[in-house]
Image (cartoon, rainbow, N blue to C red):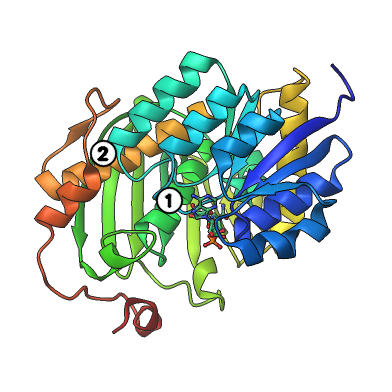
Amino acid sequence: MRNQKYRVLVVGMGKRGMHHATTFHANPRFEVAGICDIDAARLEAAKGKLGNPQTSSDAARLAAAIKPDVFCFCTLPNLRVPMIEAAVISGAKLVAFEKPVALTSNEAFTMKRLLEGAGVKTVVSHQHRYGAHYQKIKQIAAGGALGRIHTVYGTATGWMTHMLSHMIDYARWYAGEPEAQWAMAQAAGRSKFADNHPSPDYIEGVVQFVGGIRGYFEAGAGAPDQPEVAKWWGKNRVGVQGTEGFAEVLTNGGWRAVSRRDGYQSGEGVMNYEADMPPYIQDMADWLDGKSVHPCNFAAAYKGFEIMAALQRSAANGGQVALPLTTPEDEQALLKAAIADRTVLVSDEVNKKEYGL
Ligand SMILES: NC(=O)c1ccc[n+]([C@@H]2O[C@H](COP(=O)([O-])OP(=O)(O)OC[C@H]3O[C@@H](n4cnc5c(N)ncnc54)[C@H](O)[C@@H]3O)[C@@H](O)[C@H]2O)c1
C-alpha cells in the first residue's frame, strides 16, 4: 500500500546500526518500532534519538513481539544465520543487513535457502553505490562512452572481510552485473585472522566474467596505496576499462575518466554516510511499495559473495574455482589451514600501522 508507514526493528546499535536507525527514523515512510543490542548502555543511549521504541537484548524475542515490516541487523560479521532465522520467523517483508553477506559459504547457502524459501525481499549494505562520484562512473560506463567493456578492477588497503565485498560489488555494477565463470587468487599473512573481520592480511585475484570481461581484485596490506587520498579507509580504487576509454573512482578521492568520445573528465567526491544513507533507505520503501527493486538487492550481493568465496577457496587450495558455487565450504577454516606463518609484505609504509608492523 502506498504511503503506508513501515515498522522497523534495528538490531545492533553500533556505528552502522545507528546510521540505519537514525535514517529510518528521519524518513516519514518508516517508524522505528524496536531496537536491540546486547550492550544495555548503547540501547539506552540510542532510544531517545529514535522516538523511544521498544528495546530488548534478544532480537528474536523482540521481532516476535513487534512483528516488524523491516528487520534490519547491523551486527558484526560473525552473526548472520540466527538473525535471518529470527527475521523470517517474525514474518518481516524485508530484511536489510550489512556486508559482507557471510564469512563462509556454509552460512551463505543456509541464508539464501531461508530467504528465498520465505520469499522475503533482502537488501545488503553496499551503499557506496549512492555516492555521486561512484554514480558518475556507472553513468559513463552504461552510457557507452567506454565502448566494449573488457576490464574491471577494485583495490583496497583495508582487509578482505571489511573491503573486498565493496570492491567486487561496485566493479560488477560497472560491468553491467555479468555472471562470473571462475576465480583464482593468492593470499598472505595471518595477523587479521584474530580481527572481528577475520581475514588474511592480503588477498589478490582474477575473475573471469561472461563476455570476456576480466576482473582484478586486491584487498589488504599488499594492495597499492592511493597517495592522492589522505583517509586510510578511503584508499580504494574501482575502475572500468573498455575499447574506447577508461573510468575510475577513488572512495575518498573523486573520479576521472578518459574516452575517445568525451575526452578527459574528472570530478570531486568522498564517501559520505550522511549523503548515501537517505536514498539507500528510501529505496527500501520503494521496493516495499512495489515500485522498483532495490539496487543493493541480495541477488546481486550474493553473486559478489560467491566470487569472494571462490577467491578464498583458490587462495587456500590453489587453481581455478568454477562459479557459481555448487557445494558449501568453510572458507575461513580453509584459509587458516593453508596460509603460511610469514609476515605480510606491504605495498607502502602507510599500510604498516593498520597491520601492526
Ligand atoms: N557498509 C559500510 O559502509 C560499512 C561500514 C562499516 C561497517 N560495516 C559493517 O557493519 C557491520 C557492523 O559494523 P559496526 O562498525 O557497526 O560494528 P559495531 O561493533 O559498532 O556494532 C555492532 C553492534 O552489534 C551489537 N551486537 C553484537 N551481538 C549482538 C546480538 N546478539 N544482538 C544484538 N546486538 C548485538 C554490539 O553490541 C554492537 O553494538 C559489520 O558487518 C561491518 O562490516 C559496513
Above or below: residue 166 compared with residue 330: below
Location of residue 258 in the rendering, given as x and y in whole percent from the top left corner: 58, 53
Above or below: residue 12 compared with residue 189: above
Label 2 Cα crowd, 10 Å radius (few <14 / some 14-19 / many 20+): many
- Residue appearing at x 61%, y 67% in the figure: 253
SS of the residue under disc 1: loop
Q: Which residue is mark 2?
A: 310
Q: Quadrant of the N terminus?
A: top right
Q: Is residue 10 left or right of residue 39?
A: right
- Residue appearing at x 34%, y 49% in the figure: 216
Near-viewer residue (353 or 135): 353
Q: Which residue is mark 1?
A: 77
For the residue marked with disc 1, what is the amino acid? Pro
Which of the two labelled residues, at mark 1 and mark 2, occupies the earlier sequence position?
Answer: 1
Dot label at residue 157: none
- Residue appearing at x 72%, y 50% in the figure: 21
The answer to whether the residue bearing label 1 lies less than 8 angstroms from the nearest atom of ligand 1 is yes
Location of residue 309 in the rendering, given as x and y in whole percent from the top left corner: 29, 40
Q: Quadrant of the C terminus?
A: bottom left
Q: Is residue 328 left or right of residue 239?
A: left
- Residue appearing at x 52%, y 51% in the figure: 75
Instruction: Single out the mark in the foreground, 1 or 2.
Output: 1
| Figure quadrant of residue 198 | bottom left
Near-viewer residue (166 or 216): 166
